[in-house]
């Protein structure tokens, strides 16, 4: 028979379940999301901002107009 403390991933979660009946695993996931979501949002915002500024400041003389190759049919 496997004891309950071996099933739970870490000692913090195991102690929280035994003593207070708290939801330490849920809080751990929430804290990780509170760290990861703003970081990913910041990187995404930076990339979009850089793309928009690059497009707005592009000198038209350096812009290559796409010309479709002639078809041989």
Image (spheres, rainbow, N blue to C red):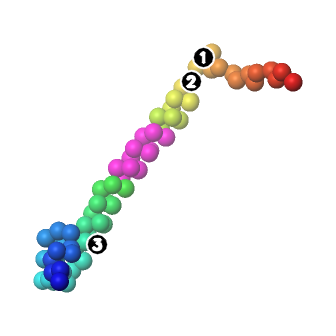
Looking at the rendered image, the quarter that the N terminus falls into is bottom left
State the count of labels.
3
Q: Which residue is mark 3?
A: 26
- On the image, the x and y values in percent for residue 4 come to 17, 80
Locate residue 32, reporting x and y percent: 29, 60
Residue drawn at point x = 33 percent, y = 55 percent: 36
Measure the alpha-carbon separation of dots 1 and 2: 8 Å
Q: In the image, residue 11 lies at what x, y percent?
A: 13, 70
Residue 33 on the magenta segment: no
**How many residues crowd around disc 2 within 10 Å: few (fewer than 14), some, or many (20 or more)?**
few
Identify the element where label 3 is drawn: helix
Q: Residue furthest right?
A: 73
Is residue 1 depicted above or below 27 in this figure?
A: below
Left or right of 7 on screen, residue 38: right
Residue beneath label 1, please?
62
Q: CA distance from mark 3 to mark 2?
A: 48 Å
Q: Residue at x 58, y 20 (%)?
A: 59
Q: Which of disc 1 and disc 3 is earlier in sequence?
A: 3
Residue at image coords 47%, 34%: 50
CB atoms at circles 1 and 2 under 8 Å apart?
Answer: yes
- Magenta: main secondary structure equals helix
> Where 21 falls versus 70 (above or below)?
below
């Amino acid at each position: 028979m496997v004891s309950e403390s071996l099933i739970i991933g870490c000692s913090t979660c195991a102690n929280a379940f035994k003593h207070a009946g708290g939801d330490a695993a849920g809080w751990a996931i929430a804290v990780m999301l509170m760290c990861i979501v703003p970081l990913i949002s910041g990187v995404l915002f930076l990339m979009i901002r850089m793309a928009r500024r690059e497009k707005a400041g592009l000198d038209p003389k350096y812009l290559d107009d796409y010309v479709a190759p002639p078809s041989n049919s």
